[in-house]
């Protein structure tokens, strides 16, 4: 039987592929490569000396998606595929609605048609919006403040309202906080297309371009140093949670936060990154961005109790592994 990874060429999906290769679990990647490429997948094939099944297809192409379901004996689906830029979602809400929500709706219908027994959906802490209380547990009201977060709420609603996922399928909705880091001493990592949007790729681009300044949006938040606070989690801790979810056989829908339960400010990240990697990161403060919240970090007690999962890697490890990937990727370019 086969696991399908939608969006499996992306940052998180490719790290899931790495674990499945390690565990000798059969899988196929389905990715239209609209906001990723095959660099991480090629690196994994070379490292593990294995060929990875890869279908370059769009979830909205029902004819070819049915072909894929008919070709492989798919019993589990991990749904990573998504456009994911908060800023872009504000500028192009219809694009995000069509790709993320409509694409997921078609996939959900295929899961029922082909009687898939396990489904893991890649959701986001963006569904919570501005926190009413901290830390945020899974019962916190859903109040997204950008179209990307609204997409995730809409997809969650489709799943939660469907009798199939309640009574016939082992269904897990995983709400990610902020994954950073890399796999296997920097073998694979986050490769943004175009201008970097996430914190670590932006930091790495500043280190590469020594004339640039890192832009911190907002230094007047009511936090310990004035900069926004987030829950950052090592990518491999996040993937460990997916693996445990994949092993679980409990029928019905469970929703889990995936975070460390600790809040780190932007300056915490920059200062730690500088210290552990012995690099300089010059920065400048800019006005707050629309759609950013002051502080957001997880209550992760539920997944600890129900799946026996806990994060094991600290902030220093996250920063070291992210920089290792940057150096590894730069070395490969020079070669």
Image (spheres, helix red, strand yellow):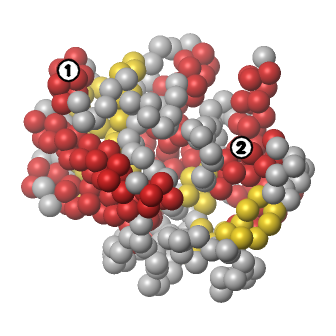
Q: Please give the name of the residue rendered at 22% of the width and 40% of the height, measured from the top-left corner.
A: 107
Q: Please give the name of the residue rendered at 60% of the width and 16% of the height, measured from the top-left corner.
A: 46
Whichever of callouts 1 and 2 sits on the residue coming sooner in the sequence is 1
Which of the 4 image quarters holds residue 189? top right
SS at circle 1: helix
Residue 41, image x and y in percent?
Answer: 53, 24
Return the residue nearer the eye: 236 or 34: 34
Q: Nearer the viewer, mark 1 or mark 2?
A: 1
> Quarter holding the C terminus?
top right
Residue 143, image x and y in percent?
Answer: 36, 75
> Quarter holding the N terminus?
top left
Q: Please give the name of the residue rendered at 82% of the width and 44% of the height, measured from the top-left corner.
A: 209
Q: Please give the name of the residue rendered at 47% of the width and 14% of the height, measured from the top-left corner.
A: 51
Residue carrying label 1: 67
Number of residues whose C-alpha sits closer than 10 Å to that of mark 1, classed few (under 14), some (14–19) or many (20 or more): few
Number of residues whose C-alpha sits closer than 10 Å to that of mark 2, classed few (under 14), some (14–19) or many (20 or more): many
Would residue 6 be found to the left or right of residue 171 on screen?
Answer: right
The residues tagged by marks 1 and 2 sit, at their Cα atoms, a distance apart of 38 Å
Circle number at residue 321: 2
Q: Is residue 19 visible?
A: no
Circle number at residue 208: none
SS at circle 2: helix
Looking at the image, is 86 positioned above or below residue 290? above
């Amino acid at each position: 039987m086969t696991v399908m990874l939608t969006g499996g060429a992306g940052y998180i999906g490719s790290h899931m592929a790495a674990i499945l290769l390690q565990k000798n679990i059969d899988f196929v990647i389905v990715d239209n490569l609209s906001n990723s490429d095959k660099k991480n997948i090629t690196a994994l094939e070379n490292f593990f000396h294995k060929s990875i099944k890869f279908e370059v297809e769009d979830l909205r192409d029902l004819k070819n998606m049915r072909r894929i379901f008919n070709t492989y004996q798919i019993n589990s689906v991990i749904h990573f595929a998504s456009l994911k830029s908060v800023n872009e979602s504000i500028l192009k809400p219809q694009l995000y609605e069509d790709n993320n929500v409509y694409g997921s709706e078609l996939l959900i219908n295929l899961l029922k048609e082909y009687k898939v027994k396990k489904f893991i959906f890649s959701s986001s802490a963006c569904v919570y919006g501005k926190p009413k209380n901290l830390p945020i547990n899974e019962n916190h009201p859903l109040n997204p403040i950008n179209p990307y977060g609204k997409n995730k709420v809409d997809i969650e609603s489709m799943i939660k309202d469907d009798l199939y996922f309640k009574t016939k399928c082992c269904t897990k909705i995983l709400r990610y906080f902020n994954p950073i880091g890399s796999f296997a001493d920097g073998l694979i990592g986050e490769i943004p297309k175009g201008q970097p949007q996430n914190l670590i790729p932006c930091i790495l681009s500043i280190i590469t371009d020594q004339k640039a300044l890192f832009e911190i949006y907002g230094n007047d938040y009511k936090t310990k140093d004035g900069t926004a606070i987030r829950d950052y989690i090592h990518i491999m801790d996040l993937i460990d949670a997916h693996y445990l979810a994949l092993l679980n056989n409990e029928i019905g829908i469970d929703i889990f936060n995936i975070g460390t339960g600790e809040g780190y400010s932007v300056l915490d990240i920059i200062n730690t990154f500088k210290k552990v990697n012995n690099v300089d990161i010059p920065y400048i403060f800019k006005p707050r961005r629309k759609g950013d919240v002051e502080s957001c970090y997880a209550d992760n007690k539920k997944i600890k109790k129900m799946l026996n999962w806990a994060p094991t890697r600290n902030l220093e490890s996250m920063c070291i592994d992210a920089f290792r990937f940057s150096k590894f990727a730069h070395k490969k370019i020079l070669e």
